Image (cartoon, rainbow, N blue to C red):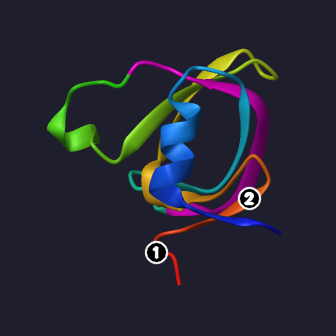
Amino acid sequence: MDKIQLFEALRQVRDFKPFSVTFVKYSPSKKTGGEIVTFSNVVMQKKVDNSRKQYLITVRVPEINEIRTIYFYSIIAINGKQTLLRTS
């Protein structure tokens, strides 16, 4: 699997074109998670200017006709490329 730096991957998808994303599901309020979820053809929505939500991205998921919020650091792949926090 190809690798890409997380911040570079997010820069590429900010143009509101469809992309696929794989992330680890987590709910802090329910204290549940660990499930790996993949959505295809999602489109990034406008960023919400709220300091408490600075590590969240919002995407529209046409497969299930919903808008989902994803924790930035839980993303493990974008467009089939494994995301890394740093390049090594």
Front residue of 87 and 82: 87
Q: Main secondary structure of the magenta part?
A: strand
Q: Which residue: 50% across, 29% down?
A: 14
Left or right of residue 49: residue 74:
right
Left or right of residue 79: residue 25:
left
Instruction: Look at the image and say whether residue 47 sits in the magenta stretch.
Output: no
- Tell me the amino acid under the disc marked 1: Arg
Instruction: Measuring from the top left, give residue 36's x and y in whole percent.
Output: 73, 59
Q: Quadrant of the N terminus?
A: bottom right
Q: Quadrant of residue 51?
A: top left
Q: Secondary structure at mark 2?
A: strand
Q: Which residue: 54% across, 23% down?
A: 15
Residue 86's label in the rendered image is 1
Residue 32's label in the rendered image is none
Q: Work out how far the residue at label 2 is from the one at label 1, CA to CA, in angstroms.
A: 14 Å
Instruction: Measuring from the top left, give residue 42's x and y in whole percent.
Output: 69, 27
Front residue of 64 and 49: 49
Choose the circle earlier in sequence order: 2 or 1: 2
Q: Which residue: 51% across, 44% down?
A: 10
Against 19, residue 18 (above or below) is: above
Instruction: Measuring from the top left, give residue 35's x and y in whole percent.
Output: 70, 61
Label 1, residues with CA under 10 Å away: few <14, some 14-19, many ≥20: few
Left or right of residue 76: residue 79:
right
Q: Residue furthest bottom?
A: 88
Label 2, residues with CA under 10 Å away: few <14, some 14-19, many ≥20: some
Left or right of residue 40: residue 85:
left
Q: Which residue is mark 2?
A: 81
